Amino acid sequence: MSHDLIRLRQPIKDDLVHFLSWSKDEELRHLMGWEYPNCEDEMTAWLFNKNQNRDRRFYIIELAGKPIGDIELCNISWRSGQAEIKICIANKEYWGQGLGKRALEIILKEAFETFELSEVYLRVYAFNQRAVHCYEKVGFNLRGILKRRDPNWQEIWLMSLNKNHYKRSRSLMGA
Ligand SMILES: CC(C)(COP(=O)(O)OP(=O)(O)OC[C@H]1O[C@@H](n2cnc3c(N)ncnc32)[C@H](O)[C@@H]1OP(=O)(O)O)[C@@H](O)C(=O)NCCC(=O)NCCS
């Protein structure tokens, strides 16, 4: 699978059908810890709201023209130069082929080179080791762990990547 076939683009109304199908997936909800709205009206409002927000850039991940998930920079603080990243490759047949890594590389380039942010961060459940590995591969480091006494509470890892680290790893790769 060529990673060059990955592209990020703005969502359009026709994408609603994909989000509606992804929203029904229990495993995705479990892994991500957040939910897509699950009816068409709510989904339309949700998507419209995402595209209107100044503190957010939300994209469909396309593989050779086929929508396979979404990725966003959210909670962007333009003043402090920080933003959170969320990603979901919703089509499971594409997991573990380096496509999540490629989508992250594209959004990191936008965050650090176009928007000139100074740091990006994300939250991930500790049990989601596929995601953790993928984040580590693009340079994220573990910064903190959120724990509760409640045994049903899933441990959350906070990971981040700053601009200097990003630039250093790019120059080491000769990019
Ligand atoms: C998390 C996600 C974005 C990763 O993207 P991906 O394309 O599947 O991941 P990549 O192929 O780029 O990298 C995955 C890495 O984890 C490794 N991996 C795969 N399955 C694994 C597992 N079960 N446990 C540990 N590592 C695993 C892979 O081997 C790979 O590392 P390597 O290249 O060193 O071999 C994607 O799987 C996804 O969206 N999953 C569902 C939603 C989700 O979990 N979102 C993240 C919420 S924080």
Image (cartoon, rainbow, N blue to C red):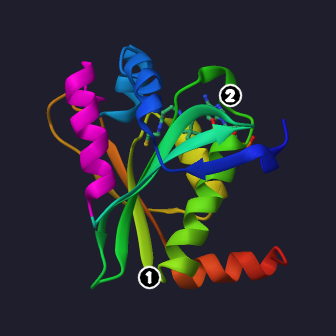
The three-letter code of the residue at mark 2 reads Tyr
Foreground residue among 63 and 10: 10
The three-letter code of the residue at mark 1 reads Ser
Drawn side of residue 126 relative to residue 94, left or right: left
Q: Horizontal and vertical percent for residue 44? A: 27, 32
Q: Write the residue at 42% across / 24% down.
A: 28
Disc assigned to residue 94: 2
Query: Where does the C terminus fall, quadrant-wise?
Result: bottom right
* Magenta stretch, overall SS: helix
Drawn side of residue 144 relative to residue 101, left or right: left
Disc assigned to residue 26: none
Residue 57 vs 130, above or below: the answer is: below
The earlier-in-sequence mark between 1 and 2 is: 2
Give the CA distance from mark 1 to mark 2.
31 Å
Residue 75 vs 128, above or below: the answer is: below
- Is 50 colored magenta in this rendering? yes
Label 2 CB sits under 8 Å from any ligand 1 atom: yes
Name the secondary structure under disc 1.
loop
Q: Residues within 10 Å of mark 1 (few under 14, many from 20)?
A: some
Q: Residues within 10 Å of mark 2 (few under 14, many from 20)?
A: some
Q: Horizontal and vertical percent for residue 19? A: 41, 26
What is the span of residues highlighted in magenta in the rendered image?
35-53
**Which residue carries the number 1 mark?**
118
Q: Is residue 38 visible?
A: no
Residue 12 vs 163, above or below: the answer is: above
Drawn side of residue 54 relative to residue 14, left or right: left
